Amino acid sequence: NAGVMQNPRHLVRRRGQEARLRCSPMKGHSHVYWYRQLPEEGLKFMVYLQKENIIDESGMPKERFSAEFPKEGPSILRIQQVVRGDSAAYFCASSRGQLNTEAFFGQGTRLTVV
Amino acid sequence: AQRVTQPEKLLSVFKGAPVELKCNYSYSGSPELFWYVQYSRQRLQLLLRHISRESIKGFTADLNKGETSFHLKKPFAQEEDSAMYYCALLDGSGNTGKLIFGQGTTLQVKP
């Protein structure tokens, strides 16, 4: 089991471009969480998805950000028209269930907007 | 409001010295708390959770509801303990399993 895989590890985008971050959960895991870590801050929850469903997106900015977890393939976090303030590390975690199950983290994608 | 506070950004100790990484939380009800560790260039991984009451790599953490604290302790620090440590609280609203993280403390163990 390769663990939670995120790609790319590093992503550079110019202001106004789109950023797509991918997360492949661990085998057998159907719950995916996205967190964002701004410089000098802790991880902040963004969105929680199960296969084909967004369960909780209370941490997602209202505009430009979207997430999906299709039946087949990885979960995608999409940021449209990126701005400098989107520069951060984005972490994905997966688990078998919601509660009382350990969440395993990926290595993160570091997004830099220039 | 649910919140986790780690007051120290950096904790520097010598090898063999005791270590205490502080974590305070704000939560109404029975909290479920965790410590995560991130070694250099590695992914975030679970170190311990209070409900299991384990000791991992010599680390322990006791939940103190009176002081709303969950400090991480180790009696004798090793150089390989140098890492970033995050305290996290399971968000109790909505039963979604999402975590609320503190800002993290970098532990530096000097030889």
Image: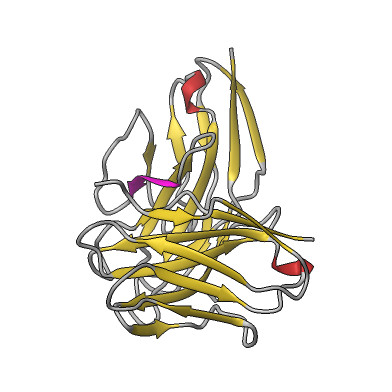
Residue bounds of the magenta highlight: B44-49
Foreground pick, B42 / B90: B42
Q: Residue A104 at x, y = what percent?
A: 35, 54
Residue extending farthest to the top is B111
User: In the rendered structure, does residue B45 fall within the stretch colored magenta?
Assistant: yes
Residue A18 in percent (x, y) is at 65, 73
In the rendered image, which quarter is residue B65 located in?
A: bottom left
Q: Is residue A113 above or below residue A79?
A: above
Say how the picture is coloured: secondary structure
Residue B63 sits inside the magenta stretch = no
Q: Nearer the viewer, residue A16 or B56?
A: A16
Q: In the displayed structure, does residue B51 sit left or right of residue B28?
A: left
- The answer to whether A44 appears left or right of B88 in the picture is right
| Quarter the N terminus of chain B occupies | bottom right
Q: Is residue A7 above or below residue B92?
A: above
Percent of width and height locating residue B96: 35, 76
Of the pair B106 and B65, the residue shown nearer to us = B106
Residue at 29% of width from left, 62% of height from top?
A: A95
Q: Is residue B96 left or right of residue A80?
A: left
Residue lying at 40% horizontally and 70% vertically, measured from the top left:
A75
Residue B36: percent from left, percent from top: 43, 47
Tell me if residue B3 comes above or below residue B106 in the rendering: below
| Magenta-colored segment: predominant secondary structure | strand
Q: Quadrant of the C terminus of chain B?
A: top right
Q: Which residue is located at x 57 percent, y 64 percent? A: A36
Residue situated furthest left in the rendering = A28
Query: For this rendering, which residue is in front, B18 or B15?
Result: B15
Residue at 42 percent of width and 62 percent of height? A23
